[in-house]
Image (cartoon, grey):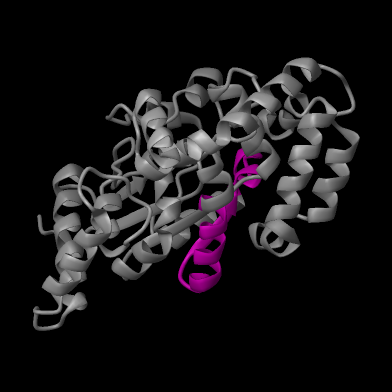
Amino acid sequence: MPADDLTPIFIFSIQRSGSTLVQRIIGAHAGVATVSEPWLLLPYLYTLRSKGVDAEYPHALMVEAVEDFYRELPAGREDYEHELHDFVMRLYRKAAGDEARFFLDKTPAYNLIADEIIRLFPEGKFVFLWRNPLSILSSIVETWQKGHWHPTIYREDLFIGLPRLISAFQEHRDKVHAVRYEDLVNNDEERWNALMEYLGVKFDAAALDRFRETELKGRLGDTTGPAQYAAVSPEPIEKWKQTICNPIRREWALRYLRFLGRGSLETMGYDAAALTDELRTAGSGTTHLGADAAWLVSDVAREPLRILMRHYGIGGPSVVAELIGAGRR
């Protein structure tokens, strides 16, 4: 079956937003194929970006070479992007099989390139999944940090990915569909029906119960939700209040809300004042306070080193030490 009768679906979110749950439920509908996380478009679209990639080769120089190459094509960059579109669609069709009408690509790191993806796939369907930023922060701490507070880790999602998503949504809001995680897990069938109607898939309410049966082949993706919940549950909505449990965590979270700003939070469907008020009533205890103070000092001390590692794509502290030493000479 040709690729031109397959509709690509993209879920845009940052990590810990509930995207795997949404992927599983959409994938439980007839005609929708998906795999865990393809990440396919990242390297190809970054051939058009001079920044943001660490590699053994000089990436910015490679981008200049690609630009010189596509300028020689009859339609220039348009030809390059058209071929990239067709190449990816052929791969989606092969992964989807002959019977599928849709292929769902859920790759959280696409928050960095959402704008380019929307422009590259005019036939696509684009779901922006928002979640309370305090819940995202809590989920990062509890899931990946085992409850430990590391305020400088996962900055790419929180401080780069989410603002880029908001910007892409504002630019393309007339052709995309936005939904809040909190509304979906409240079993609001009206929200699910509206989402599926946008996608062009007939809503099957039974998918809300059988989402655990959706097979996601691949090594990436979240497995904690399906393991904890046998059905769609609103229980995670308030869990952030248990994580933001002392003044250090509360102050960091307040600063993060101020960083996002009222306008961005409203774009996502959240009231900045209400979130701030809720946050001020939380975090008044002393749980983990001593450990968090120690981690805060340690993380702040290590952050310049982490920045250096991110910038150069360094894999070991010995190389970092060598670079630092070279810079001092």
Q: Is residue 253 magenta?
A: no
Residue 206 visible in the snapshot = no
Residue at left 19%, top 59%? 62
Q: Can residue 71 be seen from the camera position used here?
A: yes
Q: Is residue 85 left or right of residue 242?
A: left
**Residue 125 at x, y = what percent?**
38, 61
Vertical arrangement, residue 270 with respect to residue 151, above or below: below
Provide the residue span drawn in magenta: 161-189
- x and y percent of residue 296 in the render? 69, 27
Name above or below for residue 277 compared with residue 139: below
Residue reaching furthest to the front: 329
- Viewer-nearest residue: 200 or 118: 118
Q: Pick the quarter of the image with the C terminus.
A: top left
Residue at position x 71%, y 65% in the image: 263
The picture places residue 245, in percent across and down from the top left corner, at 80, 25
Q: Is residue 184 magenta?
A: yes
